[in-house]
Amino acid sequence: MEATQTITPNGNVFSTLFADYAEARTEHFRRRIFAKTVHDLEALNDCQLSDIGVPRAEIKQRAYQSVYHGAPYRQ
């Protein structure tokens, strides 16, 4: 007698695949926005950065907070 394996999925396979795809697209979008934000802020001069309250040393940190945690540039 031949053994067979029965797989019982916890949910719909397609909904799981769609959720994974949506999560990957969201992460890709966030990475693009983060890179653009850092690029745009680094293009500003020190006077412009001072006007918006972002020290040059904190550009990546502030961009990350803005993109991944919804925090505004000004704290």
Image (spheres, rainbow, N blue to C red):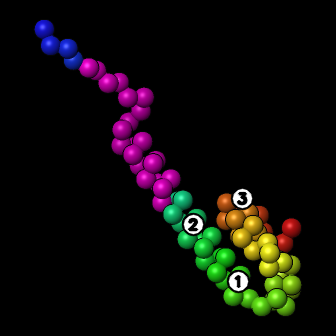
Q: Nearer the viewer, residue 12 or 66?
A: 66
Q: Which residue is mark 1?
A: 42
Q: Which numbered disc flags the more N-terminal residue, 2 or 3?
A: 2
Tell me the element at label 2. Answer: helix
Q: Closer to the observer: label 2 or label 1?
A: 1
Question: Disc 2 or disc 3, which is closer to the eye?
Answer: 2
Q: Amino acid at mark 2?
A: Arg
Confirm or deny contact between disc 2 and disc 1 (CB under 8 A).
no
- Graded by Cα atoms within 10 Å as few (under 14), some (14 to 19) or many (20 or more), the crowding at tag 3 reads few
Q: Quadrant of the N terminus?
A: top left
Residue 11 appears in which quarter of the rendering? Answer: top left
Left or right: 39 in relation to 25: right
Q: Is residue 45 left or right of residue 16?
A: right
Residue range (magenta): 5-25
Which corner quadrant holds the C terminus? bottom right
Where is mark 3, residue-wise?
69
The residue indicated by pointer 2 is 31
Q: Position of residue 55 (x, y in %)?
A: 84, 78
Measured as percent of width and height from the top left, residue 23 is found at 50, 53
Quick one: SS at disc 3?
Answer: helix
Q: Residue furthest left?
A: 1
> What's under tag 3, amino acid-wise?
His
Residue 72: image tag: none
Q: Is residue 60 left or right of residue 2?
A: right
Residue 27's quadrant in the figure? bottom right
Residue 72 seen in render:
yes
